[in-house]
Amino acid sequence: MNFELSDDQKLLVDTVQSFARKDSPTTRFRELRATEEGFDRGVWRQMGELGWLGVMFPEAVGGAGLGVQEATLVLEQLGATLVPEPYLESVLLAGTALLHAGSDAQQQRWLAPMVAGETVLTLAHTERQARFDAFDVSTRAERRADGSWLLTGEKTLVPVGHAADALIVSARTNGAQRDLDGISLFVVEPSATGLERQRLEFMDGHKGATLRLRDVIVPPDALLGEAGQGWKSLELALDHGAAGTCAEGAGLLRAVLEMTRHYLTERKQFGAPIGSFQALQHRCVDMFVEVELAKSTAILAMIKASAADVGERQRALSAAKVTLATSGGFVVRQAIQLHGGIGVTDEHDVGLYFKRHHTLSTLCGDEQYHVERFARLPGFAPLD
Amino acid sequence: MDMTYSPEHEAFRREVRAGLRAAMPAALRAKAEVDAHFEHDEIMQWHRVLASKGWVAPHWPAAYGGPGWDSTRRFIFAEELEAMGAPVLSPFGVSMVGPLLIQFGNEQQKARYLPKILSGEEVWCQGYSEPNSGSDLASLQLRAVDDGAGHFILDGQKTWTTYAQYADHIFVLARTQPEGKPQAGISFILCDMKTPGITVKPFLTTGGTPAFCETWFEGVKVPKENLVGELNQGWTYAKALLGHERTLVAGVGISSRMIRRIKLIAKDTWLGGRPLLEDAGYRAKIARLEIQLEALKMANYRTVAAAQLGHAPGPESSILKLRGTEIQQACFDLAMEIMGHDSLSWNNPEGTIPAREQSIAPQFNYIRAATIYAGSNEIQKNIIAKFILGLPA
């Protein structure tokens, strides 16, 4: 049992941390949230050049051949200053799907340029009726006589959907709407005829799109893996994404605690720093406790995200996701409360963190979804 | 980062698990299986069993009779004890005065007291709190006056002296210097409970057990050789003890076992024509509690791993008592809720309610003390606010 980072991991973390603090303070996020894309492709290319986008991918696609642990460690540091580049979507979500389901040729074509920082990717799985059940797929894909595929359906609130150079879209090739069997993953490029991308804003300042697929034709090699066998890859991608949200959340929450601690020390009322008042001290300690728990379960998620046993993996990830929502939810709410009026202004950063926390809690399954998943896992009631 | 134990530690776990199972007398095992309440005699019986294996004081240095285990082994051992529902040993000798004597006592004191703490021949209790000195412990008033003839004369009252009625000795924080900063006038004194002038009166807790006592001292004559360390330094010694074995204070093993117990109760409780455990709403409640424990366990593992590497405890260690005790209480809250009408029963004959439920109601009451004793959770928060968060005074 060891939670120390290896020397290589430490080096990676230090480099990313220094970038986040020096080159991407929250002012940078504020500038970018006012732009069309919401992030900077130049910075994305730099991340590629520095090797950050490839940590969890094999050397064959230009990666470092490490693992999810390294990718989530990067994300944890990016979360601390709200770095807006789409690391979660591109690396952990879409990247995992391509890595797990894609052939060598497909990985060369779509993963390698992303690893190099030339393109961004996203995973488009969300459908209105599905809520968090990613297997509930009503988007249909039919094989045409020439082997190409015809896709029809709608994906809602897809992060980075507005900007992605390739989208991994889940579609049903057979079976009923909620069958685990019959789900396929396709790579859809934005130029595809019949694809409408309606750009939209997320509460946290990130951008995305509603995707409408109206008889979109994609070539035979757009299908990742075997037809109808995409669920395992999709599920893994969402679990890796969940680990990513927990890691980014851990970085975010520590920053929120520090911000609040600092404010309590500086702000004076009744002739004293408000941090000298016991009611506020205890609240800040409560926040500290929850931050430590969220950090602890984020580590659990980082380690278990690549566990061979699916039950073990999901038990850890669901526990971490619930903790991110509950512990983290407490922290960001109390942070605003302790900041008082300034906390509800757009001018102060604490509100930006509050919003981002909500996104992270919700993506890849919200609190209730993960409580229920945890309670359904084999081993929850070994006495059955 | 990885969460696996080394092969040596895994082997150690198998060894102590087998050893503990084989060593536990049948009568105790039967009670442990249904998590029944253990009486003092049973706890001491178990103490002697562990003593015979050299496992009473895992955290004592080998020179004083400890088994010489590293911090991970000590954690594993505690987990195994808790997982089997073993009686919890009285902490006052083994975990409190013992380590304190090892650190601050003189050779005569160590030779006189330590072996009998290990063997269980002598039982200790703690004389810290007083009727007017609870959380503000440093305000304590029990006086120890030098009679000029080789003795301290103790006068005053201690309270919450847990299981003083069974104790052979008490360690007392006494005021030896009435002026100046309160913390600077306290001494740490050992006292034989048979000394004339000591009166012990147990009182019932809400849990129905006589766990606590009031203990009066009237002209109690204690040899000066019973002073530990230096005069007026008792507060420093007592505080040093607080940092000991931080990795074990969360009680994650106890709560893990309690979650299992909750599930067993839920399996045998009916709701809507099927086991309550199959009800999605209750299942989610149990899951939420288990997830809270999962998070605490991870925080605990972090402290164990850091201790194994010889690092000082990190900030996460300070949350263990705080959250650990809250979760222990939440476990009993949920057990009581799941028991429904059964939760109303109080010490009725066997068969009134299932054996596994029998001790829940008393423990539901007694566990309220967990967030109060050993520095109430509010005091813990004061400490974290000051020393970890650095908030202004």
Image: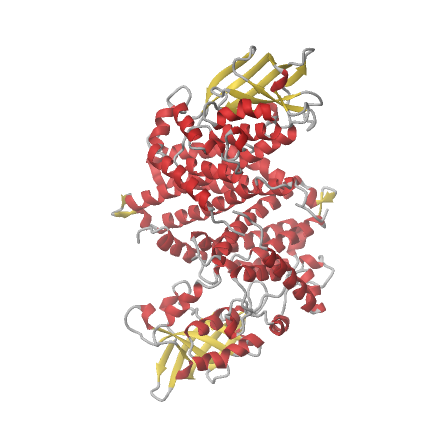
Residue A283 vertical position relative to residue B77 in the rendered view, above or below: above
The residue at 72%/68% (across/down) is B26
Residue A51, percent across and down?
45, 33
Residue A206, percent across and down?
44, 26
Residue B44, percent across and down?
61, 73
Query: Is residue B236 among what the camera can see?
Result: yes
Left or right of B321? Residue A234 is right
Q: A40 and B158: which one is in front?
A: A40
The residue at 65%/29% (across/down) is A231
Residue lying at the far left of the rendered structure:
A271
Q: B190 and B75: which one is in front?
A: B75
Res A123 quadrant in image: top right
Quarter holding the C terminus of chain B?
bottom left
Left or right of A298? Residue B54 is right
Q: A261 and B196: which one is in front?
A: A261
Query: Is residue A133 among what the camera can see?
Result: no
